[in-house]
Every structure is written in C-alpha cells, then in structure tokens.
Image (spheres, grey):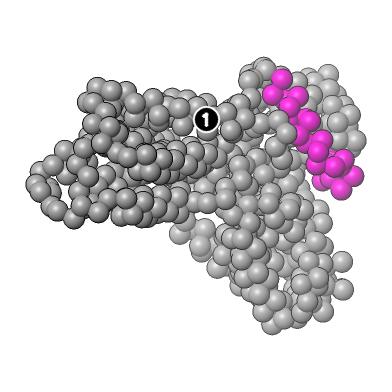
C-alpha cells in the first residue's frame, strides 16, 4: 500500500460529516463576549531574549560587585574572552528557549535538556582547556561555598526572568522551569567567574560547572511541584 | 438568547467565513490560512466579529482533533469549550505575523493533556483506545464507525495520532506541526514515518485499501 493511498483514505475519513452544532459555537461565543476587550500582544522573541540576557548580566555583575571582581582581575585576556563569550552565547540560547516555552506555538529547535547538557559539556571543555593547575586544596570546603554562591545568585536571576515573562503561558511548566533554571545557573556561573580567584582545574570543573545542571534541575523540580500542587488544588475544588 | 443575537452570530459567521450556519460544510470553502492571522490580530484588538469568525473556522478542526484522540463526543465538546476559554484567556500570547493554526493547536493539546491529568482518566483512555483499535481492525463496511477518522487512527500511539491528524487532516505543514507539538521538524518526520508504517500494516491486513473505493467514498 502506497503513502498516497493512505493519504487518500485519511482524507476521505476526515470528510465524514461531523455533528458539531451551531448552538455549541453560539455558546462558546457567548461565553467570551462579556470579557472581549483589546489586549497587548507579547513583544518579539528577540526583545524578550535580550531582556533576559540583560537580567542575567545584571545579576552576575551585582553579585560580583558585592563580593569583589577577584577572579576577573586574575584572568588573562584569552580566559576573559572565551569564558564570558561562551556564557553570553548560552545565556542567549537559554533565554530564547525560555521565551519559546512561554509562548504557545513557538518553533523549538532544541530541547531544554539538550541545551542543559550541551551548555554543561561546553563549559567543562572551556574550563579544561584554560585551567591547567591540577593541585587540589580544600576541595570540598571551598567548593561548597562556590556552589552555594552560584546557586544563591541563580535564584534572583530565575525570579526576575519569570517576572519578565509572567504574561506568557507555559504549555509544559517543567520544560519552562528547566530552561529558566539553566538561565539562572549561567548567571550563577557568571558571578563565580567574576569573583572566584581559585583557578585550580578540579575546583572550577566540578563546583563552578555544577551550578548549571543543579540550577536547571531545581527549576524543573519547582515547576513540577507547582504544577502538581495546582492540579491537586483543582481536583480538590472539583470534588467539593 | 434572543433571535436578534442569533441573527447577529449567524450573520457574522457568514460574513467572515463565507458560510451558512453549517460550519462543517463551509470549511473547505474557507479562505487561505493567512486570514486566520488577520482575524487573530483583530480578535486581540477586541473585535467580537473576528472572534466569532475564528470560533466558526477553528472549532470543527479542534473538535475533530479531540475526537481523533479517542475522546467521546461529549468530552470533545467539553474540551472544545475549555479550549476556547483558555484561548480567550491567553490570546495576548499570540504574536502578529506568526502562524495562528499551530498556536490554536498547541493550546488545544495542552487542554487535552490537562484534562487527562486532572481527571486521571489515562486508564479509561487506554481501555477506550484498545476498544477502538479492535474496531479499526475489524472488517471494513461492517459499521459506519470504521470509516471515521478516529477509528482509522486508533491503532496509533497518541503522539503519532495527533501528528497525523494535524498534518494530513488539518493540512498543516511539518513546521507548523512542530510548533504545535513543541518538538522539532525532525521529530515530527520520524513520527509520521512510524505512523505510516503502522497504518500500512493495519490497512494492508484489513484490506482497507480495497475498501476505500467502496467503503470510504
């Protein structure tokens, strides 16, 4: 059986008369009529993405300004260029994905999990290429502080990003949370790169990079919990 | 609702869709999809006529989409109303210039998934699907239901069914289906390929290809 024949069968089946009544259409129209009024459409994607990147940059700069730009001062030109251009690129991609997740019918060229994986691997590659000090001093005690600092700065970045896109409508809140968490994680890594003067490879590879996947996972988990609770509340209301 | 309101509604549907009150008959005569974007922009500006026109044009497709997902007719009607309420609530998320049909379908898809999640009807849905699958694999011409789209698509998994419905029945492009399902074009192509393989096996096994000359026309 050829594809054209299947097309033909489907088309003929689709032409079967339906029993959608005009009264139903009338009822739908009546239900929306009282609240019909002009609404302001969302701005273009590039504009919202740009705003999200600016929010991330602002959070990173504010965090580093408070703690000190020790890491940035210690870096050479190549390190500065490579690290911050990669962070900016992935912040743009994560921002764009977050915008797509908040607007129904957007074209999605990559998934949030793929971006999270690619971003983490790229950061690992860049850090492994740039930092060659393989000493390990106070690996866990110093590392935990960096991880905590990074995650702590991811929270305001995610919150401000969500505030910017609050008029959007997430069809898949978990994916939206994952994209927002990744974006926040990149802001957290930005703070660490600007501030942390510890250039030991193991420290940066493990504790700095870990901010991105952990923040992404936390974003997805929070979104899943909120959706679960919302569903639960709706069910409870329905059964009352 | 008074007769005056009914006339207004019917009149606006005819005006915008070039159709009578029977919207299903009017569907093939509709103007190109680009008008949907124009109507959507006017709906965002608060034009009730554009809203009624959109309801007349999109509702049959959306209802068919719900029916193809093995919903009962009553459920499909409920979901259709729920979808329009949601569309109305989030109409500001449509951006002028973007294709409107994937936007409608993306919301309809969300409402359907939400409906399942809230009512925990997955198991019932699977039972229905199984029952419909048996219908679809029965001898063509046995019952009118066999010829319905939902019965034809019943053997397919949900993700493939919705893609086939959008692509082949609603006439959306691969990119539009990808937009509506929040996936990539490659993923849509893969689903279509797998669905056709399965349909080919099913239709070949039941002799539906032969039946289409007599049974389906």
Q: Counting other residues with Cα less than 10 Å from the Cα at mark 1, is it few (<14), some (14-19), or many (20 or more)?
A: some
Q: Which residue is pictured at 32% across the width and 40% down the height?
A: A76
Residue drawn at point x = 32 percent, y = 23 percent: A62
Q: Nearer the viewer, residue B192 or A192?
A: A192
Res A211 → quadrant: top left
Chief secondary structure of the magenta portion: helix
Where does residue A109 sit, x and y in percent of width and height?
Answer: 57, 50
Query: Residue A189: x and y, percent?
Result: 31, 39
Query: Which residue is the site of mark 1?
Result: A50
Q: Quadrant of residue A142?
A: top left
Instruction: Decide if residue A218 is on the left or right side of residue B17.
Output: left
Residue A92 drawn above or below residue B48? below
Q: Quick check: is A158 in the magenta stretch? A: no
- Start-end of magenta stretch: B20-45
Where residue B102 appears, x then y in whole percent?
67, 44
A162 or A227: nearer the viewer: A162
């Amino acid at each position: 059986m050829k594809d054209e024949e299947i097309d033909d069968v489907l088309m003929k089946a689709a032409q079967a008369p339906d029993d959608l009544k005009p009264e139903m259409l009338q009822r739908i129209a009546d239900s929306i009529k009282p609240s019909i009024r002009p609404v302001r459409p969302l701005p273009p994607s590039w504009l919202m993405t740009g705003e999200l990147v600016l929010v991330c940059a602002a959070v990173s700069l504010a965090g580093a300004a408070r703690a000190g730009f020790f890491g940035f001062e210690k870096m050479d030109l190549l390190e500065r260029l490579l690290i911050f251009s990669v962070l900016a690129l992935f912040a743009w991609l994560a921002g764009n994905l977050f915008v797509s997740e908040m607007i129904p019918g957007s074209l999605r060229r990559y998934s949030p999990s793929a971006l999270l994986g690619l971003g983490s691997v790229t950061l690992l590659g860049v850090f492994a290429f740039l930092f060659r000090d393989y000493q390990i001093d106070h690996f866990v005690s110093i590392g935990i502080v960096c991880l905590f600092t990074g995650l702590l700065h991811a929270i305001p970045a995610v919150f401000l990003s969500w505030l910017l896109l609050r008029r959007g409508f997430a069809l898949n809140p978990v994916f939206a949370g994952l994209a927002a968490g990744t974006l926040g994680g990149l802001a957290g890594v930005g703070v660490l790169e600007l501030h942390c003067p510890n250039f030991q490879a193991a420290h940066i590879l493990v504790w700095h990079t870990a901010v991105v996947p952990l923040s992404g996972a936390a974003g997805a988990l929070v979104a899943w919990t909120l959706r679960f609770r919302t569903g639960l509340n709706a069910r409870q209301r329905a059964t009352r | 609702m008074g007769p005056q309101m009914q006339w207004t509604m019917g009149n606006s549907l005819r005006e915008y869709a070039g159709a009578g009150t029977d919207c299903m008959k009017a569907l093939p005569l509709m103007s190109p999809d680009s008008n949907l974007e124009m109507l959507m922009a006017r709906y965002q500006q608060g034009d009730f006529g554009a809203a009624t026109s959109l309801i007349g044009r999109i509702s049959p497709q959306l209802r068919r989409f719900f029916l193809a997902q093995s919903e009962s007719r009553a459920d499909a009607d409920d979901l259709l109303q729920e979808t329009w309420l949601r569309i109305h609530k989030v109409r500001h998320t449509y951006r002028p210039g973007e294709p409107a049909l994937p936007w409608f379908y993306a919301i309809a898809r969300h409402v359907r998934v939400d409906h399942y999640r809230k009512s925990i009807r997955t198991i019932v849905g699977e039972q229905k699907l199984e029952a419909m699958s048996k219908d679809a694999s029965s001898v063509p011409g046995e019952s009118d239901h066999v010829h319905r789209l939902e019965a034809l698509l019943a053997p397919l998994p949900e993700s493939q069914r919705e893609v086939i419905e959008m692509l082949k029945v609603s006439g959306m492009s691969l990119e539009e289906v990808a937009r509506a399902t929040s996936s990539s074009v490659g993923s849509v192509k893969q689903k279509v390929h797998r669905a056709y393989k399965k349909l080919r096996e099913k239709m070949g096994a039941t002799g539906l290809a032969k039946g289409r000359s007599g049974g389906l026309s």
